[in-house]
Image (cartoon, rainbow, N blue to C red):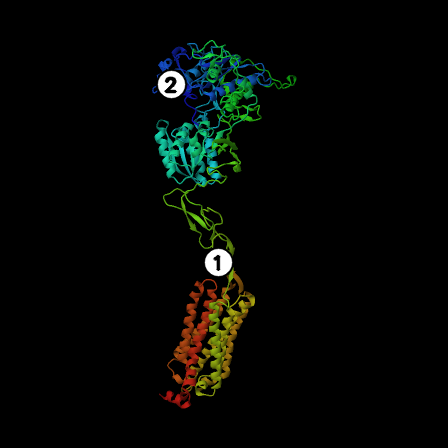
Amino acid sequence: MERSSPSLLLVWLVGRELGLRDGLLCVQMLTCSHWGRLSNQDVFQDGDVIIGGLFSLHYQPPATEHDFTQLPNYKPCTGLEYFELQYIYAVVFALEEINHNAMLLPGVKLGYRIFDSCGHPPWALQSALSLVGGDDTKCNFTNTPNSAGNIEEITDRRGGQTVPVIIGGASSISQIISYLATCPCLSDRLEYANFFRTIPSDIYQARTVAQLAIRFNWTWVGAVVANNNYGHTAIKVFQEEIQAAGVCLAFVETLQRENIISDARRAALTIQASTARVILIFTWYTDVRELFLQLGKLNVTDRQFLASEAWSTSGDLLQNPVTSKVAKGVLGVAIRSSAIPGFESYLRSLHPIYRPDDEFLRKFWEAEFGCTPGVMSVQRASLSHCNGTESLKKVQNVFTDTSQLRLTYNVYLAVYAAAHALHSLLCPIKDSPSENNSFTCSSPKHIKPSELLQHLEKVNFTTPQGEIFYFQGADIPAKYDLVNWQSTADGTLKLVLIGHVDGFALHLNESAIQWITGSNQVPISMCSELCPPGTRKAIRKGEPLCCFDCVPCAAGEISNKTGSIHCERCPLEFWSNTKRTACIPRQLDFLTFNETLGITLTTAAVTGATVTAAVFVVLLHNRHTPVVRANNSELSFLLLASLKLCFLCSLVFIGCPSDWSCRFQHAAFGISFVLSVSCLKVKTIVVLAAFRSARPGAEALIRWFGPSQQRGSVCLLTCIQIVICTIWLSLSPPVPRQNLGFQGSKVTLECAMVSVVGFCLILGYIGLLACISLILAFFARKLPDNFNEAKLITFSMLIFCAVWVAFVPAYLSSPGKYTVAVEIFAILASSYGLLLCMFAPKCFIILLRPERNTREHMMASQQK
């Protein structure tokens, strides 16, 4: 709350503006210049040490232009402030407690001189000067200024006692303990080295409000602040605290005291138009009253307000009918309250008859009872004499109410802080054994402000209430009450304590809070609804971070919390469920017999094996015909057997991979195809040898490559593949393994190649034999059709090579189980190619053109 000016800092500030050392208004030759004298504006009690006090007991509206030289022309103060009067007697009560305490300042009597500054800057300045400079026309300096520019000793000429401490003011000429000033600027020890306060800085309450917004997940908050240092500092600290917590300000409206009606109207319209349901208000209660009035006119009754300590405990607002309509459920930070034992009894025992020189009490008595105490020398003609039966014992008003002592307790603490500092200075503990750790107090006549300052900074004591008190620089540790405005049965509002703040710790009873809705359900205030699980936030371009869209998580990512900023990727063994809210184990995936692809490939393989068996039967039945005999029937039958094995070996690739299936499938595949290609190669060699032997001198060629040699060649070529497979499977065979590289909900179970070299040797050997067969067949393609199969072998080898050349990139780019399907397809395609190219023409002649299956037809064709 910006209470540091004018009555708290005015002495120092005015003096500084005039270029005077330490704020004293002195001319050359150290002569003081006074602006008139305030009569009956103070209360005094003699003592060894005088504690000064500045309080605004009355209220005087400020003039348009302050003419300090015409100060006596101002009208007397009016409007007695009962709160301030209670503060004054808190000082008196505390000093009387201290004077009766044998352990605190023994032998030293504390007195007081308390001025009424009337809330008027010039009078506050004059009162402060009266405290530190006396009422005479000349300043009384017993010592000269030191090197730091501070006066070493200042005396009050009224009683001759020193005035080392002022409660309530802020000056650089003596130590000041303020109970009310909250401006963060006062924490600067370079600027305000002599200043202390018993109320926390506004920084701490702004941080507390930020903690509340974060705690209740209010990410979209509006703010209405005073257009001064109090409001600007508070909103700046609030923004710094919420910046990293995802809380945004929907708007910031300012209120100027001079334009309060128009500013409050503008702020009310902004609140009405905003989607923010939580509104933070940092300003004085009179400004809040006008704002609530404007909100009531607009019928805005569904906003949750966060209150600063400037208005969170305002009785004026709590009793206002408009407030009960607009601001139910206010959650606010309040100056901490504490009980002062015996203080209520002390207040109710006050009577002018016991304090005949107390002008403050006399004015209060006249205002409360409408009569003038007979003992007073000054009487008002309009008031009658009191009959003596008047008493405060049953009076219920702000002055006698001690149920929640907030600023009053701060005043009480300020007095005790001053007393303990004086005790530390004047009454040091004697450590000698003979004196039994006792202490004696020295004379208080020569108190140096610089020495007292050092002791104030080191103050650390336990109050009569059991609270440990100490200063942290100019400040005290932050302590606040958390209050809630709750509706009563008769429709009014009451103040309920629902927690407290101790330092940086927030202690809150959430179940005791009554919100704007009248229930215990926390209000929701956000620019965008929280993203549900399975989605993440996507910030809208050009808008605050709190305004966002919800984007579903990508496949393989999840968000299992509401309002997730990003999605988390699942581990390799897991995948996201359909809702993207949880990672579930990835299902094992492999090519099975009961799925469409598996059924298709199985059908193709079985069909191929059946057709091969049928061709075998046809050729076997017609083995003595010229078509079968002319083309090496033995190798043809062996080729059919190998093709049948090729068709059947593809079935081993279907189903759940196991150790035996991974070893057998590639070995069966490699050996079967080598057997097939070997037969074709030998067939091609036989064709070439047969026609070469027809030339003169080449008869021996066919003899050296007879049936035995043909069978041996096929066996030798196949055995080489068998040796390669045996070595490969013995050293590093394929093993079943989960392939986690493929991103999907399923993990492929496949036969992993531990040694790629072995697999490459198998394929490379098959490719080598196929290329040799293709080359030989290509050279023999122009031989007579009916006597050789060169063209058929050429076509079959072309198809075979094309299939396996295309297989490599298709195999490498296929995901998951489709790599197995590609391999099976390559086996079936090449097998069908060999079967159709080699045996379809023969079966056509045997079954459909039997007339061409004769020796004469074949010889005639040869002659052509």
Considering depth in this image, is 511 or 121 the residue closer to the camera? 511
In the rendered image, residue 579, in percent from the top left (x then y), is placed at 47, 54
Residues under numbered marks 2 and 1 in contact, where contact means CB atoms less than 8 Å apart: no
Q: Is residue 840 visible?
A: yes
Question: In the depicted view, which residue is nearer to us: 709 or 735?
Answer: 735
Image location (x, y in percent) of residue 159: 49, 10
Residue 206, relative to residue 536: is it above or below? above
Query: Which residue corresponds to mark 1?
Result: 745
Q: Nearer the viewer, residue 483 or 114?
A: 483
Q: Amino acid at mark 1?
A: Ser
The residue carrying mark 2 is 19
Check the image and report above or below for 231 versus 590: above
**Badge 1, how many Cα within 10 Å: few under 14, some, many 20+?**
many
Please tell me in which quadrant of the rendered image residue 240 appears.
Answer: top left
Up the image or down, 587 lies above or below 118; here it is below
- What is the C-alpha distance between the residues marked 2 and 1? 80 Å
Mark 1, secondary structure of its residue? loop
Q: Give residue 232's position: percent from left, percent from top.
A: 40, 31
